[in-house]
């Protein structure tokens, strides 16, 4: 069976992504020969959680630029925070970047590999009189920092001699001081208008085990110190980060200039915000540990592993990232756009199949008891190369309960007593009798079929107003189907006082006793298809038992996003 996609084929990338201000900068730098025309970018995740769709934006941007400008993109684990980081996250991040279709070649780095060099750089700053060990408490450091409108105050320890600072920094390193007893700070300007420049901390004491360096270190560099120097060590040319770091650029430049080392250029862009979604690792961790979802790869999660399990393809996510573009101002992207790109991708690739989620039994009374016949069904009307398959038809069928109404209102054109409809790829049938149980619930329909309409057309040209999907009861396979809605019930859950209070209680509905056509018996995990008239569905990669598939609904067929777009254009 084909139709599902692992699709790591980068030739499907839009060959030249739309221009944006970062491309302009890079093209200008290439033209003027800055960095000798090289383009080296990096994606620097902190291994403290699983990657989400926001990270995909950064991955597609950084790796995409390196492909388009024939450079490299480094995968650097920013592992300076020993307490929160785990090997599990490192492995999941590598798997997710690869799944998206990108290759860091042999450029896989860890900031922790630079700990010795970073320490030496710190010593150099101390020798230059540009860094000092401060023994103020964390709280006092905060109080001395001042505010946006008031300058800060110098720490009483600011003028320690170089020798004293060197001795104290060494003592910090050797474990002779306790956590919180002191920090190493850059000596810049406590009255700087940019608060980031008011003697920022460079190193702190953390007596914690590190997943790579073990117990070698009990001091760890701060992000601002480690990040620019790691970029410099690796010869990054364009260091692309999100807008929150705009104020930190002055410090990035100060550290590299003061140490007189190779100096990449930091460029900021707007992070991705997505409606009905939270994109913060801290919040996503809370959802996992609090049991609000079944795990990092819960199909409702905006993580790459969740999206993959839901049935998103790497192409669709790369396409999404190309379409949202790169801007300098924060905005909120409509979740409908993500649904649009996967619908667009699966429309081309996915087999159409028949599945009945809420079955109603139908007996074709004039069809012979022991007969079954095979009918031809097209796999994908968008793509004749995808061929056709044989579908069994017999006397007892299932149709969707919603496709029948005993007393239909005016606009209901599907099956009702006395009404004729088409069964897709099969015959016209007419409902002749309704069977109910003691409580009055409809439990079965008796119908007749017209043998002359085989394949779904009447030779006399008579028309019907509805075409229904169906499966043959004797041949159908039982399946479980999970219908997903947004995880949150409000558009901007991040703005809620407690984001967990706006979780959507109906975000998953599990249907058992669904009936699917027999060709799906051996559908492999990850196989995506379209259930005719119902949506795109993907065989779950975790919960399937052979012969008893579990399907996740990837997305409905209805295109909300196009509607929203049309409304905006009116
Ligand atoms: P989070 O806010 O989810 O904890 P983070 O920025 O702390 O994210 P990192 O692991 O440090 O997570 O991120 C690695 C890279 O991904 C960074 O360069 C960061 O700018 C980028 N990134 C993170 N979230 C987004 C987002 N929503 N949109 C675009 N880029 C993002
Ligand atoms: Mg970060």
Image: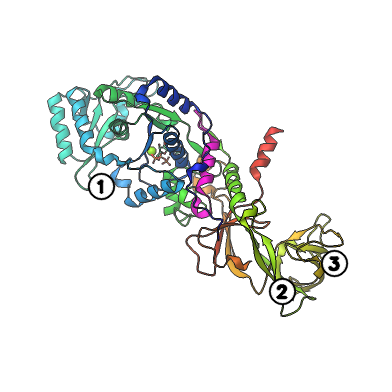
Residue that numbered label 3 is attached to = 418
Element class at badge 1: loop
- Give the position of the N terminus as an image quadrant: bottom right
Between 31 and 417, the residue placed more toward the observer is: 31
Residue that numbered label 2 is attached to = 396
Element class at badge 2: strand
The label number, if any, that marks residue 370 in the structure image: none
Q: Is residue 263 left or right of residue 133?
A: right
Q: Picture coordinates of residue 506 (x, y %)?
A: 58, 55
At 61% across and 56% down in the image, what residue appears? 386
Q: Picture coordinates of residue 430 (x, y %)?
A: 82, 67
Alpha carbon separation for disc pair 1 and 3: 73 Å
Between 449 and 339, the residue placed more toward the observer is: 449
- Give the position of the C terminus as an image quadrant: top right
The answer to whether residue 496 is visible is no
The answer to whether residue 384 is visible is yes
Alpha carbon separation for disc pair 3 and 2: 19 Å
Q: What is the quadrant of residue 189 in the picture? A: top left
Q: Is residue 13 left or right of residue 170?
A: right
- Over which residues does the magenta segment extend? 307-330
Element class at badge 3: loop
Residue that numbered label 1 is attached to = 212
Closer to us: mark 2 or mark 1?
A: 2
Q: Which of disc 2 and disc 3 is earlier in sequence? A: 2
Q: Picture coordinates of residue 392 (x, y %)?
A: 67, 70
Closer to us: mark 3 or mark 2?
A: 2
Magenta region, main secondary structure: helix
Q: Is residue 321 above or below residue 455?
A: above
In the displayed orientation, state which residue is furthest to the front: 385
Q: Which of disc 1 and disc 2 is earlier in sequence? A: 1
């Amino acid at each position: 069976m084909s139709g599902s996609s692992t699709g790591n084929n980068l030739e499907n990338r839009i060959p030249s992504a739309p221009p944006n201000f970062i491309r302009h900068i890079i093209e200008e730098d290439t033209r003027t020969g800055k960095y000798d025309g090289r383009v080296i970018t990096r994606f620097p995740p902190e291994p403290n959680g699983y990657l989400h769709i926001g990270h995909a934006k950064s991955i597609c941007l950084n790796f995409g630029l390196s492909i388009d400008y024939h450079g490299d993109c480094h995968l650097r684990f920013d592992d300076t925070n020993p307490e929160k980081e785990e090997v599990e996250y490192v492995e999941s991040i590598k798997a997710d970047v690869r799944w998206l279709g990108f290759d860091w070649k042999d450029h896989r780095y860890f900031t922790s590999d630079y700990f010795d060099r970073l320490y030496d750089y710190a010593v150099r700053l101390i020798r230059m009189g540009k860094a000092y060990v401060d023994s103020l408490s964390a709280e006092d450091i905060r109080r001395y920092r001042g505010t946006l409108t008031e300058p800060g105050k110098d720490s009483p320890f600011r003028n320690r001699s170089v020798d004293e600072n060197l001795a104290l920094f060494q003592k910090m390193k050797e474990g002779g001081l306790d956590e919180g007893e002191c920090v190493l700070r850059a000596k810049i300007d406590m009255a700087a208008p940019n608060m980031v420049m008011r003697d920022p901390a460079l190193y702190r004491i953390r007596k914690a085990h590190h997943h790579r360096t073990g117990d070698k270190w009990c001091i760890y560099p701060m992000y601002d110190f480690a990040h620019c120097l790691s970029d410099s060590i690796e010869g990054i040319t364009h260091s692309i980060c999100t807008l929150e770091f705009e104020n930190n650029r002055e410090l990035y430049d100060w550290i590299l200039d003061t140490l007189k080392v190779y100096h990449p250029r930091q460029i900021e862009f707007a992070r991705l915000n997505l409606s009905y979604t939270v994109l913060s690792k801290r919040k996503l961790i809370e959802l996992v540990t609090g049991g609000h979802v079944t795990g990092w790869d819960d199909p409702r999660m905006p993580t790459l592993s969740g999206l993959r399990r839901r049935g998103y393809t790497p192409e669709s996510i790369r396409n999404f990232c190309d379409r949202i573009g790169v801007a300098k101002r924060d905005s909120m992207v409509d979740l409908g756009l993500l649904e649009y790109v996967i619908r667009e991708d699966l429309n081309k690739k996915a087999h159409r199949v028949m599945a009945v989620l809420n079955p109603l039994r139908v007996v074709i009374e004039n069809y012979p008891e022991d007969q079954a016949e095979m009918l031809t069904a097209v796999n994908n009307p968008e793509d004749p190369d995808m061929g056709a398959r044989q579908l069994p038809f017999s006397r007892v069928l299932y149709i969707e309960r919603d496709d029948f109404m005993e007393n239909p209102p005016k606009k209901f054109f599907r099956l009702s007593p006395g009404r004729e409809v088409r069964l897709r790829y099969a015959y016209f049938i007419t409902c002749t009798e309704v069977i109910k149980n003691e409580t009055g619930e409809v439990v079965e329909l008796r119908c007749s079929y017209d043998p002359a309409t085989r394949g779904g057309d009447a030779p006399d040209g008579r028309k019907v107003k509805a075409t229904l999907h169906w499966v043959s009861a004797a041949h159908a396979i039982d399946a479980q189907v999970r219908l997903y809605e947004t995880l949150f019930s409000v558009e901007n859950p991040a703005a809620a006082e407690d984001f967990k209070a706006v979780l959507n209680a109906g975000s998953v509905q599990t249907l058992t006793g669904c009936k699917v056509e027999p060709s799906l018996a051996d559908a492999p995990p990850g196989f995506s298809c379209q259930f005719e008239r119902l949506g795109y569905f993907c065989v779950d990669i975790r919960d399937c038992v052979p012969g008893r598939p579990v399907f996740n609904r990837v997305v409905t067929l209805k295109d909300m996003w196009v509607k929203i777009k049309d409304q905006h254009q009116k």
